[in-house]
Structure formats: C-alpha cells, structure tokens
Image (cartoon, rainbow, N blue to C red):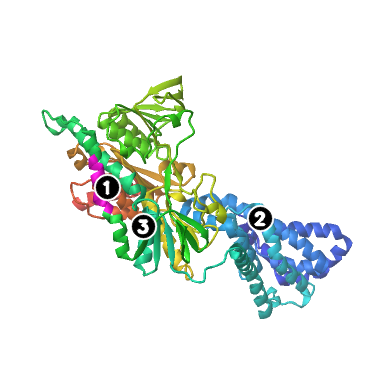
Amino acid sequence: MAVAAFYLFDLDQYLSLTALKSRLDQFREYQAANGALTAGIFFVIYVLATGLSVPGAALLTLVAGALFGLLGGTIIVSFASTLGATLAFLVSRLVLGDSVRKRFPKAFAAFDRGMEKEGAFYLLSLRLIPLFPFVVINLVMGLTKIRTLVFAGVSQLGMLPGTLAYVNAGQQLATLESPKDILSPALFGSFILLGLVPIFGKRVVDVIRRRRLYARFEKPEQIDRNIIAIGGGSAGLVTGFIAAAVKAKVALVTDDKMGGDCLYTGCVPSKSLLRSARFMQDVRQHQAFGFASASAEVDFAAVMGRVQKIIQTIEPHDSPERYESLGVECVSGHAKIVSPWEVEVDGKRLTAANIVIATGGKPFVPPIDGIEDCDYLTSDTLWELTEQPERLVILGGGPIGCEMAQAFARLGTQVELVERGERLLAREDTDAAEVVQQTLVDNGVSLRLKHTAVRVEDGQALICDGPDGEVSLPFDRLLVAVGRKANTQNLGLEEMGIETEPNGTISVNDHLQTRYPNIYACGDVIGPYQFTHSASHEAWYCAVNALFGKFRKFRVDYSVLPWVTFTEPELARVGLNETEANERGIDHQVIRYSLEGLDRALADEAAHGFVKVITAGNSDKILGATVVGHHGGELLAEFTLAMRHGLGLKKIMGTVHPYPTFSEATKFAAGRWQDANKPEWLMPWLEKFHRWSRS
C-alpha cells in the first residue's frame, strides 16, 4: 500500500535528481539555520524510504553528501540505511515469510541450512556488489531464518563502501546528471572484486584451517587405496560396491561377519519370524477362509531354525568371496583410524586417500536398576533362542518392540509390551498407530502404556511405575527394544579429534564429511535415520563425494525417505505425515482412502487400514503419504517414486492399475483428491449443458 501510494500521489517527483538539484540551495540554507533538526528530519525520511522499500535511497545518499559532507553524511546514511533495511527485512518476514515458506517448504529447508552456516558471508558479498538492488536483498533475506542482529550488522558493514562512494559523489551533486554517473566501469569493477572478498576470504580461511588440521600428521609417501570402508553392514558394503564398480581401489574392513545387523540380527531374521507367526494367525482364522477346522503346533526350535536357514541362504550375497570377485579387498580385523590416511587393523597399517566410517549401531540398554543381573535379550541376542518363553516382557513401543510383540504373541507366548509414552509408534500419526495398536491387542498382546521401567527384581520381574502406581510384570525373558546407539568405541575418534553428537553419533556435514574432509561417515553411526536403506542411500553419497568430490560434491538428501514398520497391518510412510504438517503450519490437504472398500483386500480378508496422502495447499503435489494395511510397504513405493520425480496425484490417477490388486488403493486415494478438488462452480453449468445435449 505504501509503494502504491508513493506512485499514486506522484511522490516520486520529489526524489528525482532534477528536483533535488533544484532545491539544493534551499536545503543548504535550512540546514545552515537548523543543523540538528535537518539531520534528524533527513534521518527519518531516509529510514522511511528504505523501510517501505520505495526507490530513492541512492539519491538521498547523494543529498547527504551535499548537505552534511563526507564524514557527517556517511555516519547518518550508514545508520539510517541499516535501520531502514532492517525494518524492510522485518516487514518482509512478517507479511510474506510464512506464506512463502509454506508454499516451498523443501526449498527453504535446504536454503536455511546453507544460510545458517554461511549466510553472513553471502549477505556481505551481496551488499558489496551494487549489481544487486538493496531493496530486493532486504525482502529476500526477510524470508530466511537469518537472525535480525546478524542481518543488521552485516548490512551496515557491507553497505559502508557504497555509502562512502555515493556520499563522496554527493559533494558534487550539482554537477551530476544521473546517479549512474558515479559508477564508472573501474569503480563498478572494484565493487564486484570487493564483493568477492568475503567468499575468497572464507575459502582462504578454510584452506588455512585444513592445513592446521592435518599439520600434526605425516602423510604416507605412498597411498595404496582410494577408499577404506570400516564396517561390513549395509553402508560399508554399498561403499565398497560403488567404489569397485567405478574401478577405484577399495578395502572393506570388518571385525564381524559381512552383512551386518540387517542380515544377522535385523531385517532378515525379524521378517522371517514374522512370516512364521503370520501362518499361525491364518490357522487361527481358518473359519474366515471357509475351513471348518485347522490346527498347527508351534515347534519353536524349528521356527528359529528356519530363520537361520534363510540367513544362510542370503549370506553368500554379502560374503567376502562375492565382494572379492567384484574387486573389493576384504580385510578381517578391528580397525582403528591413526591418521587421516591410515587405518590400523590388528597391528597392520592400511593407507587410503579417503576413509569411510560405517560401523553401524547396537541396541541401547537403559541403566535400569538390576537389569544386568538378568539374562535380558536385545535385537542382537534374540535370535539365539531355541526355547520359546512362556512369558515375554518387551520394553519399548517402537518398530522393533511392536514387531516382536506381535510375532511372539501369534506364536503363543504371553507378551506384555511396556511403553512409557501414551501410545505406540510415537513418530507416526495417531490414527495410523492406533490401527497397529488395536491389532496387537487383538493378537493377545497386553499393553502397558504410560509405564516407566524402574527396576528388575530377582531377575524375574520388571517393576514399572504406571498411572496407578508400581506394578510387577513377571517374565521368563525380558526383551529390551528402546533404541540403538552408534558403534564408535575404539575407532580412534577421540585421538583424531573427530566430534560426536550428544547422542553418540558422529558429527558430519551435508556432504557426510567429518572434521577431516577426507574422512566420511554413514549409516547407523551418524543417524538420523537408522534403516538399512538409508544407510545404503548415505553410502552412495560417501563413495561418490570421496572419489569425485574434487569436481562436484553432493549434499545428502533425505527429503523422500520411506520407512516401514512390518507389523500386520504394515505401517509405511514417506515424507510428511499429518502431524508434522500441522506442527509446521504448512498449508495442506489430507486425503484418506479406507481399505475397507478395496476389492482385493476384501478377498484376502485384509480389509482394514487406510491410505492417507498429504498434499500441498490446493495442488496435487504430494508432501507425504502414510499407508496402514496389508502390503503397505509395497503400496508406498508408488508414492515414493511420484514424490522423487515430482509427479502429482493427477499422474497417479491417470495410470492404469491392474484389477484386483492392492495397488489400486493408491489410485483410489488419488481419485478422492480429484473429487475433493473438482470445480464446484462448474457443476451447474455442466448439468445445463447435458440437459441441452439431450434436447
């Protein structure tokens, strides 16, 4: 409104060079008689002009030089321009900030990370180069999360050279024909070079820091490998595979079996156990499938034997023999980093230009009084069981706790699941978690929500503090499933000065580099997502950045990362869920399709759950999806693909899906969006058209 009024009332005539030059003598007379008052009025006018983002700041700066001289004019303009720019910055943040940020959440998330680290340098460079209009800089910076005091301080410093140039030129205001006259090619070039100083300065500082960082180490005369990957899990295997595929020389060091947690204690054994448990559940539901009778007896040792057999079947895929055949040097032993280029393995030193830490994680066991006196289980040791426990207490209501609770309950074990929160699966939407929670109850799992483990008594009972006081939960075995922690012990991190986060994970930047640019880390050892597929995803960035970072480095991208809790029904999600969209204040729609009406789900006696899609505003752009149902993980793949490649629900709606399949649920969800967003104003006209076409 202020800008519109400025032009509507023809106020720009008062800020033209001709008008100012014609009144210069009057201004000087008034200033001679009222020095302080003139300075104050001029200061306010300058602040208002810049704060309201109206043109004229350059001309006012010339006037300041004409009226107050080089020193006085520079002081007045320097502080007035900073104050005005900060006001414009705050107005932009207040008026435009939320709406623009909500419209482009992913773009601003990446932009904010960059601004947080190097925003001051970039702002200073922009201020020093007159090519960029200051008005635009003020408004754009208001959309970022740069702190106001930082913006003001950097702006004042960055605008000072330009202010000096214009104020100095203003002393000859009467001879100037245009403000552009003061920007000769030489002066303009000087400003550009000056604007590059902060960027080059930062690079120089980075080089100096890097040299100091490496100064205490003596680089080996000969480097034998391009990469040494430490860890034989998903992250290490993928690092080795990619490096070997592009003909780099790579060594993979592990002190355990290759294949890691996923193969031996995680994904493979748990899904194998869940499949056996699902068979028992089908037997119990035999009447729903039209059978008068059906029975089966659990042979727990045989069930666990089947789990081990599947592990053995998959084992060759991750074996040293296979990776050696691919060109990966496999080294068995404990690795310790002794320099940025050297890894010591049981006394022998290996050299490489780059090191990738991929040592994974292990179950976290909370310091509960008495827990060390009982033979508790974790996701690592659970698979050693050969005798089925009659009573199993599971501590933790996350994905591992829920999956194992359902599996053991279906196999006939009496299961009690303890969770200190108000519900299970706290990272998921409440309605999605409630479907899984109810299924666990239906399967016989006893839930102890809002219960905190206090102690273990006599190695036979878990004492919990609940809403009604202390309760004792007797058990034959106790499974601790409250999370995982990074494997960072005895790697030489402390000696190397490689920082870790408060939760124990290794600190890395957006390129997955540690404190040392040639030492990378990926997988469970860094978080924030502890999945096999996220470890593989990160390993790609580590390998490519390590091998080709001299030409281009890639920032790790978690924007489209799916995950699945493999209970029945499965709970799968990618991107934002409804809870997160609400918490972030993002303008969105929630589209929901119930699987109760899906023909294939009805045929399979699996008509429970739903598909929920979060879209941006009134568009069909997918911000996230949650699927709760049979084959939920498979259904999620279509949404993941669409999000990754910028395809909206209209594209899904226009894709033929075979009938009858579960995949139709994604199309029907897209149809719900289309129905909810049809142009209602057009419907009466279409009705009239069809009535006319029948006549």
Task: Specify the segment rendered in magenta.
Answer: 305-315
Instruction: Please determine whether, in this image, residue 159 is positioned above or below residue 438.
Output: below
What residue type is disc 1 on?
Ile
Check disc 3: other Cα within 10 Å, few if <14, some if 14-19, many if 20+.
Answer: many
* 314 part of magenta stretch: yes
Q: CA distance from mark 3 to mark 1?
A: 17 Å
Q: CA distance from mark 2 to mark 1?
A: 56 Å
Q: Which residue is mark 3?
A: 237
Residue found at the very far front of the displayed protein? 347
Question: In terms of depth relative to the viewer, which is nearer, 61 or 443?
Answer: 443
In the rendered structure, find residue 311 and report the number of the disc placed on it: 1
In the rendered structure, find residue 150 and report the number of the disc placed on it: 2
Q: Is residue 586 left or right of residue 153?
A: left
Residue found at the very far right of the displayed protein? 33
The answer to whether any part of residue 12 appears in the image is yes
Q: Is residue 273 left or right of residue 419?
A: left
What residue type is disc 3 on?
Leu
**Residue at figure coordinates x 73%, y 69% from the top left:** 19
- Which secondary structure dominates the residues rendered in magenta? helix
x and y percent of residue 204 in the render? 62, 68
Question: In terms of depth relative to the viewer, which is nearer, 223 or 453?
Answer: 223
| In contact (CB < 8 Å): disc 2 and disc 1 | no
In the rendered structure, find residue 546 and report the number of the disc placed on it: none
Check disc 2: other Cα within 10 Å, few if <14, some if 14-19, many if 20+.
Answer: few
Instruction: Please determine whether, in this image, residue 79 is positioned above or below residue 393.
Output: below
Mark 3 or mark 2: which is in front?
Answer: 3
